[in-house]
Amino acid sequence: MEVKQAEFIKSAVKPRDYPPAELPEVAFVGRSNVGKSSLINVLAGRKGLVRTSSTPGRTQLINFFNINNVLNLVDLPGYGYAKAPPDVRKQWQPMIETYLAERDTLKAVVLILDIRRTPSGGDLDMLHWLHRYNIPPIIVLTKCDKLSKNERAKQTTLIGETIEHSREMLLPFSALSREGRDGIWLEIERLAGIV
């Protein structure tokens, strides 16, 4: 997709705070510090659209972004070892699950995995949850530039076996080189029904 316009719409916690359900939506989820903000920024072609941070767990609300007035990208809080206060972390799970279960315009979820790590229990739980609710996952392996070709191949196979998905379903991505951007957009457009 050629992104001509990308803008932040609003942050929300509860369904009543979401923007009107008028456009297809694709949500982004992954453990804290997996490169979610960088991925959304590269896809949107805007460096500072989503704030990136070296501190895990900075996203504490559901953030909505409009792309070309045809699609909303939705940034969900990261899970895992976030350094947010425990009471805030406790609110995340119901907040994320409510959005995923009740948002009619949600067409797919980009599940982001760090290629250097074995998928965590949280990653597997999220994948099972998406399957249970029939939400198609787009599985993206970030930080691909940090591994050699051989290490990449080995890790991709290991991750595919761990999450029980074929290697072909795992899309490589590097925020540094922008590798994988077009392939991820093709999947988003296909599942969101954007021509």
Image (cartoon, rainbow, N blue to C red):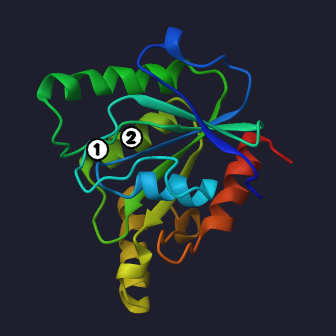
Q: From the image, which quarter does the N terminus lie in?
A: bottom right
Image quadrant of residue 179? bottom right
The picture quadrant where one finds residue 57 is top left
Find residue 136 and report its horizontal and vertical position in percent: 60, 42
Evaluate whether residue 1 shows in this view.
no
Q: Secondary structure at mark 2?
A: helix
Tell me if residue 190 comes above or below residue 75 in the rendering.
below
Report how far apart the C-alphas of labels 1 and 2 lie in the structure: 6 Å
| Residue 37 place in picture, x, y as percent | 43, 51
Q: Amino acid at mark 2?
A: Met
For label 1, the residue is 122
Left or right: 105 as drawn, with respect to 174: right
In the current view of this chain or complex, which residue is farthest to the right? 195
Question: Under tag 1, what secondary structure?
Answer: helix
Above or below — where is 67 with respect to 120? above
Residue 76 lies, in percent from the top left, at 43, 36
Q: Looking at this rendering, what residue extends furthest in the top direction?
A: 16
Is there any visible trace of residue 137 in the rendered image?
yes
**Residue nearest the viewer, comparing 47 with 77:** 47
Q: Which one is nearer the viewer's eye here, 38 or 120?
A: 38
Res 126 label: 2
